[in-house]
Amino acid sequence: MEATALSVGKSALDGALSYAKSAIAQEVALQLGVQRDQAFIRDELEMMLAFLMAAHEERDEHKVVKTWVKQVRDVSYDVEDCLQDLAVRLGKPSRWCFIRTLVDRHKVATRMKELRAKVEDVSQRNIRYRLIKGTTGPKPATGAGPSNIISGATMFGIEEARRQKDKAKVDLCQLINEGNEDLRVIAVWGTSGLLGQTVVIKGEYDNLKRSKKFELYAWIRIVHPFSPLEFLQCIMSQFYRTSFEEAGKVQDETNIGTQILMKMGAMKQDDLVDSFSKHVNKKSYLIVLNDLSTIEEWEAIKEYFPNKKKGSRIIVSTKHGEVASLCAGHESVVSELKQSSIDQSIFASYNKVLQSPTTLMKPGSGSSVVTHGASNIAMPTDEILENQFVGDNEKMVRKSFTRIGTISCALVESQLVGREKEKSDLINLISKQDDQQCTVISVWGMGGLGKTTLVKEVYQSQELSGLFEKRACITILRPFVLEEVLESLFMQLDAESSNMKGSNDFGSGTRNVKEELGKLLERKRCLIVLDDLSSAAEWDTIIQSLPKMENASKIVITTREENIAKCCSPKQEDIYKLEVLENRDALDLFTKKVFKEAIDLNEHPALIEEARTILKKCSGLPLAIVTIGGFLAKQPKTPMEWRKLNEHISAELEMNPELGIIKTILMKSYDGLPYHLKSCFLYLSVFPEDYSISRRRLVHRWNAEGYSREVRGKSMGEVADSYFIELIDRSMTLPVNEQIGSRKGISSCKLHDLMREISISKAIEENLVFRMEEGSSFNTQGTVRHLAISSNWEGDQSEFENTVDLSRIRSLTVFGEWKPFYISDKMRLLRVLDLESTSGLVDHHLKSIGKLVHLKYLSLRRCRGIFHLPDSLGNLKQLQTLDITDTLIIKLPQASRTLSS
């Protein structure tokens, strides 16, 4: 399930359930005679929450499920708003005399009925469309995942093919073999998961590989989110395998994997790109792309394969018929394939240039789509299926390169700039002798800092070359599989033995691998690198599986989270935090990447200012500097070209495949957050760029928004404060004013510019936050919950009231100058009014503040024009926080004494 949709949806549901279960909601329902409606709403919300978590466990990525989750989110907001409004307005017993009239009772009862109808409708959609497994009783066994919903256009094509059964059928092999020398794309999809089409494709793939029709072969499972560098290195590992086999450079089959590892480990990024270009430009190839999920992925991938008229073929396997048809092109017809049987039907869509199946021998070009429908096929998961088709040594390559050191590819050895001190520090840590026990050294920091690259450089350094008898460097893959980790360790630590045995000779699996590792680790000094640990549970599982190691051995781990580093390394001196590059080093790295050599940009005044703007956006993150620098290296080196990138950096990060790796790497940190922290992180998009966000301010605001609740004796404030620290520990935010060794001393945090781009993008996607600023336009169909007004927004009252639905706004934050129309009578659900440091605000602007009866947080901090607060402040019975620090208020109004929070 898409992480952001789930987290925001679950957060909204939690809030709605909290009010639906509250004593005041039950009391209101009892007095008004709508107990059944209130109970129904409460129970349905609980079921929706269960369905949401089921969707998350199934990792269901279907667009219809995502749409349903967003509808759950919206109706949850409506439920919470309605129930809270009733509770606030009707909560006091003295008010019952007012609402006991038939008219008022009818109004409230009608609202509850409407709310029940909304909840019931959304709940029924889950059952109606069978969105989540287990919600509608037994279903046919159609594979590992839920059935895809077939578009009308695709169904029309299939039915048309069935009506044309008297025509000659098309063979998949025929589509691959025949036609002219143009590059041809064949897209395959099915309604029962990937098994059916994979079996068909694999059969043809193996036959063609044995016949050596093509010069190069590669079978790639697309990793989501798509990473261009991972994709490139995975393909090249298989191209090299073919080259080694043809050249006869190997003594036996089991040695190929090791040779590929050595070959690719020695290559720099630029050399890898050049080698790939030479291969696809000069040789014919057959590529299978398994599990392509979006047309955006296809648009990015197809650019790598120019039509060199070598007769090459690309086969795309996807779960989505719409994606397959878009890969094929608009003008296509559908014919049934010869592979059809009673239990499954397979169809081919091909370009109309070919006219019909009987004319496939004629010269022509175009793309083809193969579709199939199967029933009652039991299958393993996609991952198991993929592994069944991979030999032992290919499996070894997959383990080492499926992540394919994405960061390491981007930050190759030649680009290790400004890390001399860090390299020296780590070498000293590893070299330090400890006769008591094996030492674990943890390197941590946010994604894109170059942890993998730095550790790889240290791992290969001359200074450590004579200290260890055995070495292993592996990346922890997702999903985590202990057996694969242990196998990879053993195969690298004892290459000779593992090559003779092969992974199939380990007998009883994990147990036997542990025994083999134990014998080796107890008698040899080993250096082990575990790259990209993402949880303490992974570490516990690995370390418990390793026997007592030789005391002089060292383990180095890399992670994005401080708490994992602390779990792995009990001693503080063995924990190494990697920081961003200093400005000078960042500029050196940028110029080296753009100009392929070190030059002094200060001698080019027209470029230096634009370069500084670019580097400010990168904020010292090597991954961003290298990626953007590599992109600009291929563009005209003019101020105008660099200015264009600066002005559209957000769109480029989103749409440009060459820059997409930056977002891919940073999104990994976001995706790893628990759902409650995702909502807290997205909330930070309220604040401007480079803004120092006060810890106090954030904690009180999260409390008011309902993002934190009392848990196991901890107050809301303590829970929210722990969220603040956890976001820093997970490298999602940067600490400000931190006292060394003390988390209590952190008074504020900041967002890295690129992490802020992710926060803004996801918050907009979920209709969570809208920022009114220069050039902004609200073009979504949804309703935003949090409104922030930037200091550069110069709109008028009409634009303000017509841009967003103010009646649904839960928080209003103003930066810059105050305008009287910012507080509107329509804001009946406003919980947070944050006017900290707002200029131009005076006493009379707050006269109607008492109408905001839901207000829980009111900040007037540093508003020097405020001398008095209105008596209507006493109406704010829900108020939790009133911040009047650094104002000119001497005393509070008499009515405020009735406030209880």
Image: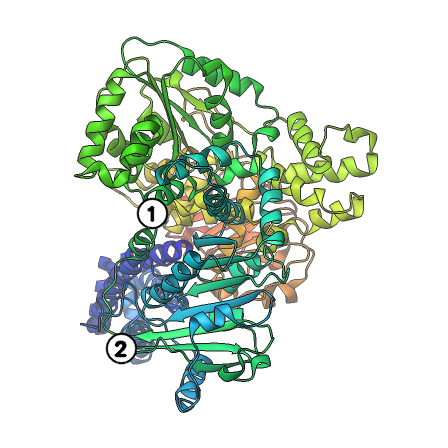
Drawn side of residue 33 relative to residue 362, left or right: left
Q: Looking at the image, is mark 1 or mark 2 earlier in the sequence?
A: 2
Q: The disc labelled 2 sits on which kind of residue?
A: Asp
Q: Residue at point 61% right, 30% down?
A: 415
Image quadrant in which you'd find residue 507: top left
Q: Residue at point 82% right, 38% down?
A: 606
Please determine whether, in this image, residue 752 is positioned above or below residue 815: above
Q: Is residue 454 visible?
A: yes
Q: Position of residue 46 (x, y in %)?
A: 24, 62
Q: Position of residue 389 (x, y in %)?
A: 33, 54
Q: Residue at point 60% right, 61% down?
A: 310
Provide the residue designation for mark 2.
343
Give the structural element (helix, strand or loop) at label 1. Answer: loop
Give the structural element (helix, strand or loop) at label 2. Answer: loop
Q: Nearer the viewer, residue 685 or 232?
A: 232
Provide the residue designation for mark 1.
391
Q: Do callouts 1 and 2 mark residues in contact (Cβ within 8 Å)?
A: no
The numbered disc on residue 731 is none
Q: Nearer the viewer, residue 107 or 177?
A: 177
Q: Position of residue 579 (x, y in %)?
A: 52, 27
Drawn side of residue 822 relative to residue 880, left or right: right
Q: Position of residue 49 (x, y in %)?
A: 27, 60
Within 10 Å of disc 2 (Cα), the crowding (few <14, some 14-19, many 20+) is few
Q: How is the image coloured?
A: rainbow
Compute the Cα span from label 1 to label 2: 30 Å
Q: The disc labelled 1 sits on which kind of residue?
A: Gly
